[in-house]
Image (cartoon, rainbow, N blue to C red):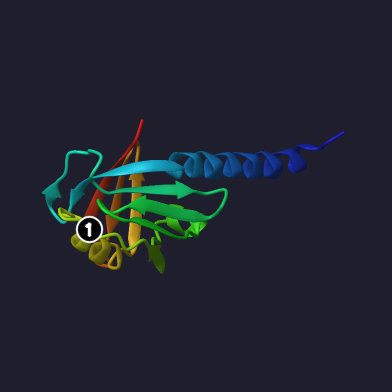
Amino acid sequence: MLKMKHILPAAILLLASCATSQSAYRLSGEWNVVNLCGTNIVPADDTPFLGFDINEGVLYGFTGCNRLTGRLDAAQFLKGKATIGPLGMTRMLCQDAKYETRFVATLDKVAASEIDGDTMYLKDSQGNTLITLKKKR
């Protein structure tokens, strides 16, 4: 029979692991960029997005022209430490890649993350929001 002093620590660990897996579940999937450096973006086939595969520890996405991929430390990301990079990227030539250069340059400046429901904020080291994303449905 378990004594009460053993049940409480076990319950706390169980709740903590549930909270972590719920946060990880919230992060998993694809997120549309809806604001890039103060410019609102209406999601479409040619607009940037980021995807997070926490099981594989991978970040992937689309710049508006090219695909990108890189490693992800989901635990650190969920704690608000969002260092992104190094990233690999395809090198297709696109005539109208209106977001790519700014998006890739901005990803290099990301230092922090915050998730609030279906909205994610990627911020610089001073806490300024650089990129706002909405979770795809």
Which of the 4 image quadrants contains residue 20?
top right
Q: x, y percentage for residue 8?
A: 69, 40
Which of the 4 image quadrants contains residue 113?
bottom left
Farthest residue, direction top: 137
Q: Secondary structure at mark 1?
A: helix
Q: Residue at x 50, y 60 (%)?
A: 73
Which residue is the site of mark 1?
100
Q: Residue at x 31, y 56 (%)?
A: 66
Q: Is residue 8 visible?
A: yes
Relative to residue 100, is residue 29 drawn left or right?
right
- Quarter of the picture holding the N terminus: top right
Label 1: few (<14), some (14–19) or many (≥20) C-alpha neighbours in 10 Å: some
- Quarter of the picture holding the C terminus: top left
Relative to residue 94, is residue 14 drawn left or right?
right
Relative to residue 106, is residue 113 drawn left or right?
right
Q: x, y percentage for residue 3?
A: 81, 38
Residue 76 vs 43, above or below: the answer is: below
Q: x, y percentage for residue 56?
A: 56, 52
Q: x, y percentage for residue 57?
A: 53, 55
Farthest residue, direction right: 1
Q: Is residue 85 visible?
A: no
Please name whichever residue, 97 or 27, is drawn nearer the observer in this view of the structure.
97
Q: Residue at x 73, y 38 (%)?
A: 7
Q: Residue at x 75, y 42 (%)?
A: 5
Query: Which amino acid type is shown beneath numbered disc 1?
Result: Glu
State how many labels appear. 1
Which of the 4 image quadrants contains residue 94?
bottom left
